[in-house]
Image (tube, rainbow, N blue to C red):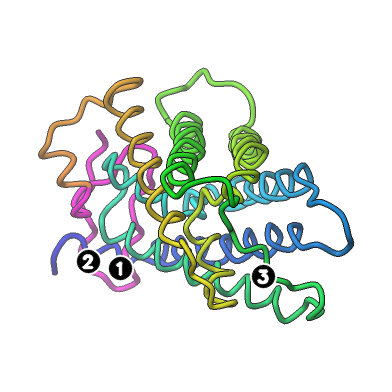
Amino acid sequence: MPPAMWEVRSPSFWRAVFAEFFATMIYVFFGLGASLRWGVGPLNVLQVALAFGLAAATLVQVLGHVSGAHVNPAVTFAFLVGAQLSLLRAAFYMVAQVLGGVAGAAVLYGLTPAAIRGNLALNTIHPGVTLAQATTVEIFLTLQFVLCFFATYDERHNGRVGSVALAIGFSLALGHLFGIYYTGAGMNPARSFAPAAITRNFSNHWVYWVGPILGATLAGLLYDFVLCPRMRGLAERLAILKGEQVAEGQAPPEPSPGDPTELKTQAL
């Protein structure tokens, strides 16, 4: 069996995939729910920012040790670019995140009165903002968020202080406090896709994939190759991407019961 396939046969792998599905469902459910308008007047931006930030912080605290609590395809893609997880795991994570987001939006849709649902907090671009400006805003929003993710999750920072969960939650809230006025603050393709799928409204939806993915990629490259370089050779990076080697900070997959051999791993 190819080395990468040992991940699929590991119980811990499937726990992590389910954790990403469940976490994204909870994140979208509470985040979108707090963004609905239950009365007249402008949207309470602080409420929305805190809801998304607190949801992310809670999920990192609860499930960070299970899957990393990425809860975001852009974050997972950045970790893939940095060769911090295998291509197989990244693919399963991203599918689970998108499906979890849709599940969360669907539950919210079913629980919310029809008069309140509206567009289910669909991300929309401000009329005065161009598509290029909106994409650039999403790049910067996700850039700072993923940089925070990389820095707080970096196992080389043995002397770091403070809460990882709160740092990530504050970073996400910061992005919302600024970005809601421009684009609704997507920062997460799974969050943006969920209400679009439920309401069947994909107007300018590509902005909420291209912007976050580009921002996350830039953040991953900037952190891993400029700000805090990881001394890895090409062969080591390829081995991690193929699932033949485990990145530092990531637990080796557990062999399934009855397996005659175990996946060989090597700490970097």
In this picture, residue 51 sits left or right of residue 26: right
- On screen, residue 234 above or below 4: above
Q: Are marks 2 and 1 in contact (CB under 8 Å)?
A: yes
- Write down the quadrant of residue 87 in the picture: bottom left
Q: Quadrant of the C terminus?
A: top left
**Type of secondary structure dominating the magenta stretch:** loop
SS class of the residue under badge 3? loop
Q: At x 29% / y 39%, what residue is drawn?
A: 82
Label 2's element? helix
Q: Residue at 21%, 68% (x, y): give it.
A: 260
Residue topped by disc 2 = 5
Q: What kind of residue is marked 1?
A: Val
Q: Residue furthest left?
A: 235
Can you say whether 179 is above or below 259 in the image? above
**Pointer 2 or 3: first along the chain:** 2
The residue shown at (54%, 52%) is 186
Q: Position of residue 52 (x, y in %)?
A: 67, 49
> Can you give x and y, in whole percent of width and height, for residue 125 in the image?
56, 53
Instruction: Report which residue position mark 1 lands on.
Output: 8
Residue 31 sits above or below residue 47 on the image? below
Q: Are marks 2 and 3 in contact (CB under 8 Å)?
A: no
Image spot of residue 160 (x, y percent): 54, 21
Residue beneath disc 3: 119
